[in-house]
Amino acid sequence: MKILRSVSIEKKEIDELICNKCKKAFKKGIEFPTMKIHSFEVAFRFGGKYSLEKVEFELCEDCLSDLFDSFEIEPIRGVWSKIRTS
Ligand SMILES: [Zn+2]
């Protein structure tokens, strides 16, 4: 038999997202559904400058557009549900 007791668990929610590049802030509620800011997580493999590190950051769409514009080769674009991940 297990004797159980109630415990409180702190739950954290995102209240605001801030673009790491330009510091533009997007508050939860009105601005989140527009999806004008995106979260990224990069897990680096062994070797190289960021060996085995995990880097998390947010970029707003304006900064993403600037990044895409800086590419020598256009990124692959399409409807997200139809982009292959493998
Ligand atoms: Zn930005």
Image (cartoon, rainbow, N blue to C red):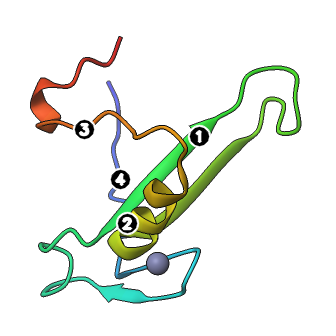
Task: Say which residue label 1 marks.
Answer: 42
SS of the residue under disc 4 = loop
Left or right of 11 on screen, residue 66: right
For residue 77, which numbered disc appears in the image?
Answer: 3
The spot of residue 43 in percent (x, y) is 63, 33
Real-space CA distance between mark 3 and mark 4, rounded to the nearest whole angstrom: 52 Å
Real-space CA distance between mark 2 and mark 3, rounded to the nearest whole angstrom: 36 Å
Q: Give the vertical position of 9 relative to 63 (above or below).
A: above
Q: Are marks 1 and 3 in contact (CB under 8 Å)?
A: no
Residue 10 seen in the figure: no
Residue 2 seen in the figure: yes
Mark before the other along the chain sequence, 4 or 1: 4
The spot of residue 26 in percent (x, y) is 33, 85
Real-space CA distance between mark 1 and mark 2, rounded to the nearest whole angstrom: 24 Å
Task: Say which residue label 2 marks.
Answer: 11
Query: Of residues 10 and 69, which is closer to you in this image?
Result: 69
Q: Nearer the viewer, mark 3 or mark 4?
A: 3
Three-letter residue code for mark 4? Arg
Q: Nearer the viewer, mark 4 or mark 1?
A: 1
